[in-house]
Amino acid sequence: MAEHAGEQRREELAGRLAAVRAEIAAAAEAAGRAAEDVTLIVVTKTWPASDIRILADLGVADVGENRHPEAEDKARELSDLGLTWHFIGQIQSNKAARIAGYADVVHSVDSVRLAGRLDVGAQHHDRRIDCLVQVSLDPQEASAGRGGAAPDLAGEVAAAINGSERLRFAGVMGVAPLGGDADTAYRSLVAMQRRLLVDFPGALVVSGGMSGDFAAAIAAGATHVRVGSAVLGERPLLG
Ligand SMILES: *Cc1c(COP(=O)(O)O)cnc(C)c1O
């Protein structure tokens, strides 16, 4: 019975994953890019570790989580899989050091202070972490202090990351504003990365695009897309 359910879930995930991969390849081709230049991060928040095992078996190497300690529990339980763990959610500063214990890439660094906390954690755990600066693609959000650094502060946060002991600035991340124009949002994210590349030649990552808009992100030049529900289904709880 349980085995049957597992087989069914595997078929479901395999089908949706193949469809998403095909859509990524089509979007890349339409943009004159190679499909291999776009990394799929499957966002597994709220879904059980058993789903992540199936995904790993289907060739997924990158997974995204947005909540501590759920992410920590899964990373520990699945440490045998050799996955790259992407932390993509907002980080409370008192959790940053713990997150540095298991995240390989943190997409949501939006302040100098948070970079400092992550570095302390990375030193404590004797780890190195790639960090993306999350930039707000919505001016109203930035002024409210949510959802990323204001664009004119991104360079300062990037410099703090690279000035730390254990963190490396690897690029930028953005979330298109709800109900806004995704094409414009992702084009501005890519433009920001291009500007940062002048001072930070290692800033090669542009993390943009979710289930609803990853084609727009790929058209704009995103190198990493974060796709949850299109692969796993609608989340059982708010995630
Ligand atoms: C949940 C989440 C995603 C994935 O969203 P889907 O719409 O399920 O693809 C991507 N990025 C961030 C920051 C998220 O929190």
Image (cartoon, grey):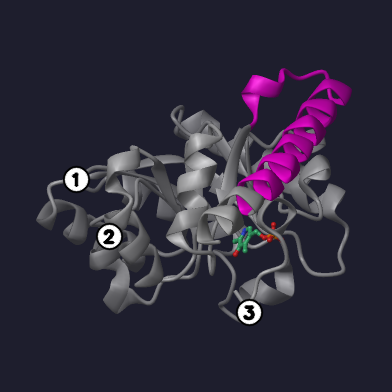
- Mark 1 or mark 3: which is in front? 3
Q: Earlier in the sequence, mark 1 or mark 3?
A: 1
Taking the image as four quarters, which one is ligand 1 found in?
A: bottom right
Q: Earlier in the sequence, mark 1 or mark 2?
A: 2
Measured in 3D between alpha carbons, the distance from the residue under mark 2 to the one under mark 3, in whole angstroms, is 26 Å
Q: Are marks 1 and 2 in contact (CB under 8 Å)?
A: no
> Which x, y percent locates residue 109?
44, 59
Question: Is residue 81 highlighted in magenta?
Answer: no
- Image-based side of 132 in relation to 34, left or right: left
Which residue does the numbered mark 2 point to in the structure image? 118
Image height of 101 relative to 146, above or below: above
Residue type highlighted by circle 2: Leu
Which residue does the numbered mark 1 point to in the structure image? 127
Which residue does the numbered mark 3 point to in the structure image? 238
Residue 41 visible, this orientation:
yes
Beta carbon at label 1 within 8 Å of ligand 1: no
- Mark 1 or mark 2: which is in front? 1
Beta carbon at label 2 within 8 Å of ligand 1: no
Q: Earlier in the sequence, mark 2 or mark 3?
A: 2
The quarter of the rendered structure image containing the C terminus is bottom right
Residue type highlighted by circle 3: Leu
Among the 4 quarters of the image, the one containing residue 127: top left
Residue type highlighted by circle 1: Arg
- For label 2, the crowd category at 10 Å Cα-Cα, with few meaning under 14, some 14 to 19 and many 20 or more, is many
Residue in the foreground of this view, choosing between 202 and 126: 126
- For label 1, the crowd category at 10 Å Cα-Cα, with few meaning under 14, some 14 to 19 and many 20 or more, is some
User: Tag 1, which secondary structure?
Assistant: loop
